[in-house]
Amino acid sequence: MNGADLLCDTLLANGVEVCFANPGTSEMHFVAALDRKPELRCVLGMFEGVVTGAADGYARMTGKPAATLLHTGPGLANGLANLHNARRAGTPVVNVVGDHASYHLVHDAPLTSDIEGLARPMSAWVGRASGPADVSARAAEAIAAATGPEPGVATLILPADAAWTDTPPQEVARARPAAPARATAATVEATAAALRENRAETLLMLGGASLSEEGLRLAGAIAEATGAGLIAQQSNARMARGQGRVAIDRVPYPMPEALARLKDTRRLILCGAKSPVGFFAYPNLPSTPLPEGCEVSTLAGPGEDALAALADLAQALGLPAGAAPKIESREKPALPQGALTPDTIAATVGALLPEGAIVCDESVTSGRDFFRLTHAAAPHDFLQLTGGAIGLGLPMSVGAAVACPDRKVVTLQADGSGMYTVQALWTMARERLDTLVIVFSNRSYRILHGELKSVGAGSPGRNARSMLDLDDPALDWVSMARGMGVEAARAETAESFTDLFRAALGRKGPFLIEALI
Amino acid sequence: MNGADLLCDTLLANGVEVCFANPGTSEMHFVAALDRKPELRCVLGMFEGVVTGAADGYARMTGKPAATLLHTGPGLANGLANLHNARRAGTPVVNVVGDHASYHLVHDAPLTSDIEGLARPMSAWVGRASGPADVSARAAEAIAAATGPEPGVATLILPADAAWTDTPPQEVARARPAAPARATAATVEATAAALRENRAETLLMLGGASLSEEGLRLAGAIAEATGAGLIAQQSNARMARGQGRVAIDRVPYPMPEALARLKDTRRLILCGAKSPVGFFAYPNLPSTPLPEGCEVSTLAGPGEDALAALADLAQALGLPAGAAPKIESREKPALPQGALTPDTIAATVGALLPEGAIVCDESVTSGRDFFRLTHAAAPHDFLQLTGGAIGLGLPMSVGAAVACPDRKVVTLQADGSGMYTVQALWTMARERLDTLVIVFSNRSYRILHGELKSVGAGSPGRNARSMLDLDDPALDWVSMARGMGVEAARAETAESFTDLFRAALGRKGPFLIEALI
């Protein structure tokens, strides 16, 4: 038994059952150890951003971490953007990074770099095994740090000699993550008092577990009883949506719309959410959309149990256990005809989405109106880009599909951001994942065209167009998908999109629709 | 005039004429400023690894830095792996990273991260503009730091408000990089003395500028006069090769071969090279391939002028100015027939490569024997993966082709590593670059199969195969290339490869050959 075997055993003993991987030479003993543990499922990504984004999607759907396997500093670097998104989503990830044998570092071999330094900005915990004897303890620490009470990315650095050196059999360490804290009675009472007195000008802002079906039921009952408003934060790891569930909107992305939406709010109560802030600053706009004088209080903050806090609050307000708000029955959108647009795509999805689907959203500008047209869709989960680091959509779909093999994953993917981690399509084909990818092909970084205009730069000239337009040459997503083993077709009208979407829902396995909008 | 205009002016005034870019919202004022400066050429990469790898390839061929344009911490993170390669190559890069407006950082908006922390491991210099008033000074510092005396990556962080805030016109700052130091007379004398006494057991190890045509001529003359051996370090930014040039081999990658190659060396003299070290450590092999007792001395170290040192050494040895070694005339390989293998591909390239071609090599295992079959090729430059962070081949080719529009760029690209930054194909099509990409399609991480075997893991089982084999599904490079606008074809025999290679040499613009080996 060597350190790598111990790491596998420790992962398995603590419920880590999937390893999204892109190994290199320094990880070969870990690969050999994984090979002796077929019960730990290994899924290859052909680029590390696929690996880390998949780990994020997996954990959002299972609530428990997957392991990654990355190759030294540059392999970690390639995975950092999606670890940034995982960090912003509060996703648990056990991020395993191989390194040179410890005694080799002094020679500064070509692949040597400061792994701790690279890991720290995106990690809640960074540790290094010093040898086979402490691999299990460090791995258990990493799992505990990833899991809670505030889940996040825990980076465990595994030197090659810690992996390959033999060690006597030992009992593997158990991770003992702390449970999330319960909101204090005083906080719950103060929140209840505020809700009783303030009513229409009070907004309860939800995030985290309060956006689960149960959380929305509680929040909906509280809102109905008190007259408070409900809203979700702008970016969320996971939301329960669709027919029979409390419909809730998010703080809009464009700052002028966010300002308009929140202008009458006098009190904001945060439950698993962060106080709203502009995604970017703009020369003539404030950094946050809250009106001056708005009081902000926190019912459940980071590391606290947002769902339990809502239950306690409902009780403090005197609501009966199991209280549920009246949920209006909504009509599904009619199947659209004519031009293919983001709205007609949303209407088709809203009409046909199967129950239990998982919608992974990285549609950027094309998805801004998606919610309005899909509140009446069959019940589904909605997973979102949380950290603004584009290139999450396809990898997150891989992870969600590995986590939930019996549920259809529908990916709303902008073309520009889809290119960042396009290699994820290959993993979908290799693992026969039940993913239906819709590419919104507008052949530009449309969001940046809008931003350039708002900068007052006038019509883009040659250099600006060379950085914002993607139409020369136009990407052919059908060819790219087929090149990676994924069946694909192109839609140019609402009718053809509906036909393709319906046909793809009727089969298992990956399929890509390039929607020319 | 705002800070962004000043940055453009400073870049141009200091000879930075190309910006490889992937901007985002926080960079829109810089994009608008670039739009007012059409003489600064902007080249879009659809992923930041393309951007940074292209900047590396560009500078290797021009000897001067390009600018990059990256979007906040995650955009930088995506570019770090190829910045790592640039760092190892000693390539000058002015790495511009946009950030939020300074006053917005306190709000910890989704895209906020520790940019300095991310940049430091791969950068020789990291700085941040504090406002428009110091943009020009900081940019000049960055250019100076990137340029020398030891070239490297200089990361300049540009907050959005430093870019957008107006500032009175000011004279732009001039970069004043220090020149590389000259080896001392004592060092040159000591080296000459060692060469006079030690002869056959002495090896002169070349790197950097000593691998230019002129450096090789000098080194070849010194070797001929003294009986010393010549070798290049394992990974080099750029080497002059082919007919009429001193043929030189590199330290082999596999440690057993490196040990065999160097076993009789009693004295190693480094000129622009690092003392050899194993790419990785292995349980039963030493970390460096030098035999015990081998004396290592340095003629020209980091920050010193390796070419001038060779000239001084030649003079100290009494060689006449312009002394050149006898260079044997070599026969080009015959055009091969039959099975398509790495060797038959190398033979075709060796036979047909046009004069002045730039060969960009990321062929990994498939290129191990390339040198033997191409010493007789027409004179060319050979650019290599220097830092082991795979995914450089295609981006480096983009940069080399932008730098040298009149020279054919031939890329030797392994399939597994090619997938890391496959988006570079699109930039080749967009910019009509004269790149001929050969993909060695072995449908596996073959190097890792070898490494797994050397670990003693026996035959790979399900988990190992799932992480090392790429054949399920097989990648279709022809489809992927066409999907990004690059013409492509597949070769399955040596004859069909030769036909395609010859045809591709006869045309301008990007072309990809998928070589099934």
Image: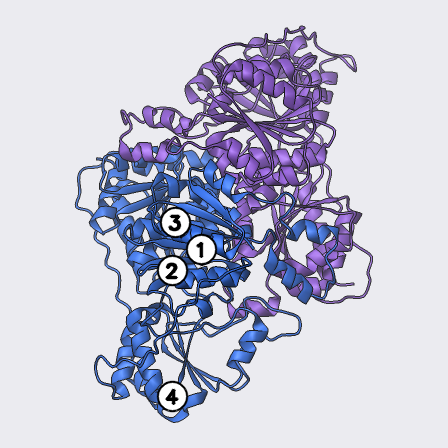
Chain colours: A blue, B purple
- As shown in the figure, which amino acid type bears the numbered disc 1? Thr
Q: Residues within 10 Å of mark 3 (few under 14, many from 20)?
A: many
Residue B194 visible from this viewpoint: yes
Say which label, 4 or 3, has the lower sequence index: 4
**Residue pictured at 55% horizontal, 84% vertical:** A292
> Which residue carries the number 3 mark?
A504
Whole-Å distance between the Cαs marked 4 and 2? 33 Å
Q: What numbered label is drawn on residue A352?
A: 2
How would you rate the neighbour count of disc 4 (Cα within 10 Å): few for under 14, some for 14-19, many for 20 or more? some
CA–CA distance in space, label 1 to label 4 = 40 Å
Q: Is residue A377 above or below residue A186?
A: above
Tags 2 and 3 in contact by the CB under 8 Å rule? no
Rendered image: mark on residue A227: 4
Q: Give, as a three-letter code, the residue at label 3.
A: Ala
- Work out whether mark 1 precedes mark 3 in sequence or the reverse, and give the earlier one: 1
- Chain letter of mark 1 equals A
Q: Which amino acid is tagged 2?
A: Leu
Instruction: Assign a secondary structure to mark 3.
Output: helix
User: Type of residue at label 4?
Assistant: Gly
In the rendered image, which quarter is residue A229 located in?
A: bottom left
Q: Which residue is mark 1?
A: A498
Residue A497 position within the rendered picture, expressed as x and y whole percent measured from the top left: 47, 53
Q: Do the residues at pointers 4 and 2 share their chain?
A: yes
Q: Are marks 2 and 1 in contact (CB under 8 Å)?
A: yes
Mark 1 on the same chain as mark 3: yes
